[in-house]
Image (cartoon, rainbow, N blue to C red):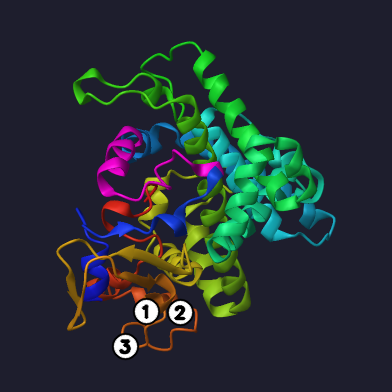
Amino acid sequence: MDAYNEVFSVGTKFDKQGQFYDHPLLEGSHFNMSDLKSSKSRREMFAPFLSKAAVARGEPLIQTTIMKFIDILREYGKDNRVVDITRGYHSLTTDVIMNYGWQRASGALDFPDFSYPSVVYTNHFLVSMILLRTFHGFFGFMAGLALQFPVLAKWNKMLAAGFHLRAQAQDLLLDAINWPKLTRQQHPSLFDLVLQPDPKTGLPAPSINDLTAETLAFLIAGEGSPANTLIHGTFHVLSNPQIKSRLQQELSSAIPDSCQMPTADTLEKLPYLRVVVKESLRFSHGAPGRLPRVVPSSGATLCGQYLPPGTLVSLSHYVYNTDSSVFPDPKTFRPERWLGGDLYQDRHLVSFSRGSRGCIGI
């Protein structure tokens, strides 16, 4: 864990490996930026929008979307229909990020059986990212060529998905540019602060192309990772009657009126719900693969081994989240492991990374 904390520390000198993170459709986003200095200024632009106070202001938008999802599930229950909860959660998180980020209803939850096309496109796009990392030269060339000649994208479903999502992102951005300036009481869109940066920061507004890439990055990350965490948590809770019963009892006491959603602050204080969420995060891993970093010019010593400058080191969240020395019986979903408030375990939960390049939404 010491090696992880050094590589993924605040102010780390370990840059991302450019080839691994480089995606032509995300070029110009903070996700694609290899060095800390470039990404830091961009992340600082978005930080006010993702602060706890900002999320609290946008909570009514989020609650409305969640209640709509619950009502849909109730209708499935009345008709004794099977629900594809995987698609359901992806549709839910799509509408949440759209409502919170842009005050735009994508209508994902309105599609029959949660068959919103962009949910499918997102899955194809994520597959393209894996292939691009594995066969960077070939797929990078194809994606770059498709950027020059968009008609080529329609011949490959993964490229077509990426271009569909990028077009959606650009439409959202152009709408945001043309919106009237919001009053102080209104919840801002994701780019209200970025399009009108505070002069005190000295940071210029990014270009349209860069903001299109940022929009796409937020759509992908805001839809995928939360949905996967919900999917893992729901599966394991429903698979264990004891966990399900205990969670139901706590929620029933905290939510006497099922039609009235409590505040996020209230839910965060429910001890068993909190540990169920933690265990769900441990199982979902965020980014499950190896995340390569480049050893800085000064070299580095990790795990007692000196590594010369330029060496690639890869660390995996999966390895740390399933370390049996920290999480006994790691393949078992056991929320109770967190009830003791063990800070040692908390420090080892790295589902969304940490440090200066950790998930911007955490």
Of 192 and 92, nearer the camera is 192
Residue type for callout 3: Ser
Tag 3's secondary structure? loop
Q: Position of residue 328 (x, y in %)?
A: 38, 88
Residue 231 as seen in the image, left or right of residue 321: right
Tag 2's secondary structure? loop
Residue type for callout 1: Arg
Q: Position of residue 229 (x, y in %)?
A: 52, 62
- Label 3 vs label 2, nearer the camera: 3
Q: Position of residue 276 (x, y in %)?
A: 45, 68
Give the mark count: 3
Please tell me which residue is depicted at 78% across the width and 54% down the height of the picture.
76
Q: Which residue is under mark 2?
A: 334
Q: Dot 3 surroundings within 10 Å: few (below 14), some, or many (20 or more)?
A: few
- Label 1 vs label 3, nearer the camera: 3
Q: Is residue 259 visible?
A: no
Magenta-colored span? 25-46
Marks 2 and 1 in Cβ contact (< 8 Å): yes
